[in-house]
Amino acid sequence: MTGLSRRRFLKTLGAAAGLLLFPQTLFTQTAGKTDFEMLVVGDSFIWGQGLREKDKFYTLVKDWLERDLFGATRRVNLKVKAHSGARIYIHEDQLAEMLECGEDPEKFHYPEADLSFPSITFQIDAARREYETGDAVGLVMLSGGITDLVVGNAVNPFLREGKMRRLIHRYSHAAMANLLDHIAEVFPRALVVVVGYFPIVSTKSDVNTLTKYLMKIVKFPHPLQFLLTNLFSKQFMKIVRKATAERSRIWVYESNKELRDAVREANEKSRRERVVFVESPITEENCFATKNSLLFGMNEDNKPEDELYAERLTECPKVFREIKYRPFGLISERMCELASVAHPNKAGARAYAEAIETRLGKFFRPL
């Protein structure tokens, strides 16, 4: 038996064991059932920035449902509204700026482009209009909160720690709780999976790689980057790395805690376990710029190592010629091109899929 088949066997065994421990499953599968509807909403993380469709973790979960649990007798229809940059809701100041410049906050664009709109709340509403009834949806998978905080603030050592914690509570708890209430109202029969975020950097992240990425954002000439990776600058960057790693650690711990609280409150309201939280399998040992990283980095030419980089080089300029609102100002297009960096790579996506499958096992009855 191969390593892969052993893992699959153990997952199926775990799902069956879950049925003995949790006989009141939300979903059962029998022959002749209608198609199963699965919806994915959220930001770049759950969208699978930089990954081909077949490698995204929501696709791997969909394939697992069809193959291992539904026994290829029930088709899973997948609808994806997630896109890069999406916020849980459009913040008032941003909405005012968008309306002032004539931007449509409900228009979908190229999903790899890092845009805060359409919001995750609107993604849910847009999806609902495409289903005959809200009862049709059996599974909703989502991620959200880090773009509301602003990704850079998750590692920003200059942001006051107290303010950072308050912002995490506002978005990962309060805003997420409202979002889960909205999903319960719109899709009342759906099991909801909230996927937790991962550490972005750690003290194990390579200093030179971090420096080169920052220089790439500001278009510092690649041949001259050795000037910023010498012994002196490396010592300075070690200080920066330690500070950003500490903020990354706070981000992961606090966002996990707040998301769990939001999930717990949603389940208390419904008086059953209809929302589950899946913690990240990615740790400080394999975050960005580590030896065995599960996140996309930069290749030897200092370019994003994902397969969609060339596509973004073509599509990102089109997006920013079309829209009037530029979330990152003059470097909006550049940030779009580099957007895959520090997102789960193929191995990272597989690790997330396996973590989700383990949590979902008790809710589905294999044939």
Image (cartoon, rainbow, N blue to C red):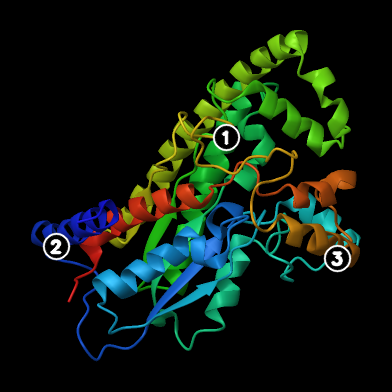
Q: Residue furthest left?
A: 20
Mark 2 surroundings within 10 Å by alpha-carbon count, few (fewer than 14), some (14 through 19), many (20 or more): some
* Disc 2: which residue: 16
Identify the element where label 1 is drawn: loop
Location of residue 293 with respect to 348 vertically, above or below: above
Q: Nearer the viewer, residue 362 or 353?
A: 353
Q: Using the rendered view, name the quadrant where residue 281 is placed.
A: top left
* Disc 1: which residue: 288
Amino acid found under the numbered disc labelled 1: Phe
Q: As drawn, is 318 to the left or to the right of 163? A: right
Q: Position of residue 311 (x, y in %)?
A: 74, 62
The disc at residue 12 is: none
Identify the element where label 2 is drawn: helix
Measure the C-alpha gap from mark 2 to mark 3: 49 Å
Q: Using the rendered view, name the quadrant where residue 268 is placed.
A: bottom left
Location of residue 111 with respect to 234 vertically, above or below: below
Q: As drawn, is 228 to the left or to the right of 12? A: right
Location of residue 228 with respect to 51 vertically, above or below: above
Q: As drawn, is 278 to the left or to the right of 288? A: left
Location of residue 178 with respect to 341 vertically, above or below: below
* Disc 3: which residue: 318
Q: Nearer the viewer, residue 265 or 33?
A: 33
- The quarter of the picture where the C terminus appears is bottom left
Q: Earlier in the sequence, mark 2 or mark 1?
A: 2
Measure the C-alpha gap from mark 1 to mark 3: 29 Å
Amino acid found under the numbered disc labelled 3: Lys
Q: Position of residue 337 (x, y in %)?
A: 77, 51
Residue 315 in view of the camera: yes
Q: Position of residue 253 (x, y in %)?
A: 45, 31
